[in-house]
Amino acid sequence: MSDQVTTSDLVFCPGPVSALPAERDRETQQPGAVPDDRLMLQSILNEAFNQYIFNRVENILKLAETNDADYSKTVHEVRGLLNRMLKLAGKLKDQYPELIDLVMELESYTALESGQSADIAYKQGLRDSGYIHQEFMTFLQQR
């Protein structure tokens, strides 16, 4: 997968959109479609989309760690701090036996929060790209 965005990669969306179905989508159903089938399909599509987002964000961040000096420095600093905290927790394990678990839990939640933030930002970028495209096209038509 290329990491360059081209105009053929852009998807037209008529303004900000949501992954959640609109009320009108819930009311009208395909003839012969069973509501459970529709929910199952929506669930499968959401899962596939979320997996794509997860993989894409992970790939982008790996590239950023290589290509973006500031991000790479931050990642290195975070890893260094975590290692220092773990060493200190190891030295203090007799006095504070729960400290290693707390450091590990902090690292897990920090990584989770970071990943969720990246997912949220990526998804909002997808929504915004359609809106920006629409605004740009409107601007060009007015000229």
Image (cartoon, grey):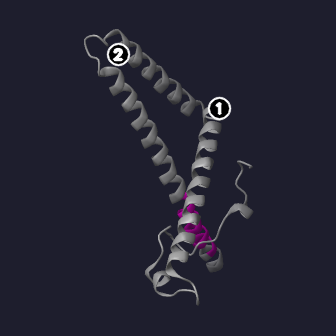
On screen, residue 56 versus residue 38, left or right, reads right
Q: Is residue 102 magenta?
A: no
Indicate whether 112 appears above or below 101. below
Q: Which residues are magenta?
A: 125-137
Mark 1 or mark 2, which has the lower sequence index?
1
**Most foreground residue, 3 or 40:** 40
**Most foreground residue, 24 or 81:** 24
Which residue: 46% across, 81% down?
26
- Tell me which amino acid carries mark 2: Ala
- Label 2: how many residues lie within 10 Å, few (<14), some (14-19) or many (20+)? many
Residue hosting label 2:
89
Describe the element under mark 2 as helix, strand or loop: helix
Give the spatial CA distance, label 1 vs label 2: 30 Å
Locate residue 57, reporting x and y percent. Answer: 58, 47
Residue 66 numbered mark, or none: 1
Indicate whether 24 appears above or below 67. below
Which residue: 72% across, 50% down?
4
Which quadrant of the figure has residue 96?
top left
Which residue: 55% across, 63% down?
46
Locate residue 68, reporting x and y percent. Answer: 61, 34
